[in-house]
Image (spheres, coloured by chain):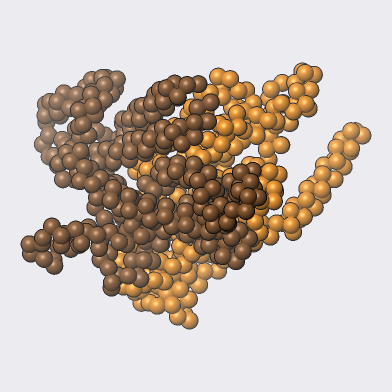
Chain colours: A orange, B brown
Amino acid sequence: MSSSVLNAETVTASNTVRRVRIVRFLRDHKPALIGLIILVFFVGIAFVGSLFAPYSVTASSGPIYAAPSGAHWLGTDDIGVDMFSLVLHGGRTSLIVGGAAAAVAIAIGGVVGVLSGYFGGAVDMILMRITDYFLVIPDLVLMIVVAAVWGPSLTHTILVIGLLLWTSTARVVRAQVKTLRERAYVRRARSVGASHVSVMARHIVPQIGPLLVANTVITIAVAIFDESALAFLGLSDPNKVSWGTILEHANDRTAASNGAWWAVVPAGACIAAVVIGCYLLGSAIEDALNPRLAVSHLAAKGWRLRSTATLSAMGRLGVTRRRNSERDT
Amino acid sequence: MRRIDYVIKRTASAILTVFAAITVNFFLFRVLPGNAVTGIAHVPNATPQLRRALTTEFGLDKSKWDQYLAYLNQLLHGNLGISFANQQSVTSNLRSALLNTIPVVLVATIISLLLGVGVGVLSAWKRGSFTDHALTTTAVATYAFPTQWIALLLLIGFSSVLPTAGSQDVFSLVEPSMWQQIVDYSRHMILPATTLALTLYGGNAIVVRSAMLETLGEDYILTARAKGMRQRRIVIRHALRGAMLPVTTLITLSLGTIVAGAILVEVVFSWPGVGEALYDAVKHRDYPVLQGGFLVLIVSVVFFNFVADLLYVRLDPRVVE
């Protein structure tokens, strides 16, 4: 009984420590704080704000392609649906797809990375070969084909994006696990008879937690980007409004020739803002994890976006990372 | 490892990747319900005999494995099948599309590289300054903007000045000269190429900047500075040269992004390239074209990646070790 009490105490203590650490991190890293504020704002308007959307997103509530006015803050679309309400609702779908697809990607990437880095040898070789193939193939092209074959639905969009975005995470996690594996405490745990599973669960995975968080945030950005591209090509659920489908409709239904910039600008600006928020937060976390980047000549104030963080943010440029890790090993 | 071993390894890996893509391509589309016969024999009064005859003719009564071998065999002969939409061979459809995509991608890549290297060098040189912040912020911002969004904005902004759809003006001239055709084509290309270049340059600038910062921290730069060399000379002659390594591979590394960007840009500006072909194929469920377009894009990306790998050894012999 006494041991369980002790455990409970340590848990609360470590939670407090963690909270203090997160607060301090945000205080010291302005970009991270800005990124977090942007993300919280958009999650807020997408999930809470959409409940208070002024008009319906399915029925027309004004004239066709009406310019922004007091009644319709962001104007209306091709059938007179209120653009502001559409953007609020669209954010929900875009963020859900982005978050869920990132979760799928991080789960796969994390498992592949941990197994590959921990076991090494043949397991590593096979898994990394597979990763290499996925790295070379242009994501969007494969996504288009798979989505076209599977048919449009929200689940399919999430899976298609998630199943193709895990490669850079797998690479980074693998590199990290490879160094962790050689740490004294991990070897000691092995030598006293801890099983592979328990070593991975207790000593490896908790250590790569922050790295996974950084990667998740950045992958969300890429996933939202990809969602908008797939939706734009008509490959997402036609019954769900998302920032991507708003742009699709604007293109398909001649918003441009009507000069209806308000049907184009808001959705894209929201995507861009969320993506920037993710980059800021993700790369700040990654920076904090990588002491090498704190070296003076590599540091610059303001937008602290540098090779590793930026490249992983770019996602599709993951190949550079391959070269880096090849050079390291 | 010797250089020849490296080249062999890379070649084998490229071939394997293409092969894997072909295999995926084959089996992915077999998951679809129905086949060519259910489509064609979807006429009233289609007798079971007709159905059976067609099945035999298309080889659909054979095993999956035999079908796969037949597919590989036809691919080797450059046969990608017949388009459902216009009943022409997919190969000829895609060939003309590819000939339209290449100029746009080429021009956009060159512009984005020049712009990216310029901006990257300048902001690394003036690191920490206002110029640096402004340039880097703009670069990151353009990177965060969805390609189709930039395309739509440019389309709205320039629709009265420049042509915004297709690759040529069909109405203006009855019998245009070669020169007039080229001018017309280039005018149509301005917006798609600019959009693509804008989406690409940001990434280039950031990579160039960080590569420059890294080389600027090297000892030989310090030496050059100690010798009293002029700043401009150090940056251009010494640092940029050292930083060119990541920059040269950049083009091929960002191929996936370029391809994705090209698809979206072509769709917005109705540019008759591979991306537009793919989009139409998706819309009309034209599976042979979709399959062929996928293959064409994958093979070109793998090919350019392979070229980059070889180029890399030439530029930096250390990678072989």
Q: Is residue B296 visible?
A: yes
- Farthest residue toward the bottom? A70
Q: Could you tell me which residue is drawn at 61 percent across and 35 percent down?
A: A173
Q: Could you tell me which residue is drawn at 41 percent across and 61 percent down?
A: B149
Query: From what the image shows, is residue A39 above or below residue A155?
Result: below
Position of B205 with respect to B197 (left or right) is right
Please state which of residues B217 and B57 is positioned toward the viewer in this rendering: B217
- Farthest residue toward the right? A2
Q: Could you tell me which residue is drawn at 27 percent across and 59 percent down?
A: B189
Q: Could you tell me which residue is drawn at 10 percent across and 62 percent down?
A: B176
Percent position of residue A20, x then y: 80, 52
Position of A49 with respect to B185 (left or right) is right
Position of A138 with respect to A104 (left or right) is left
Percent position of residue B3, x then y: 45, 24
Percent position of residue B127, x then y: 61, 58
Percent position of residue A328, x then y: 60, 32
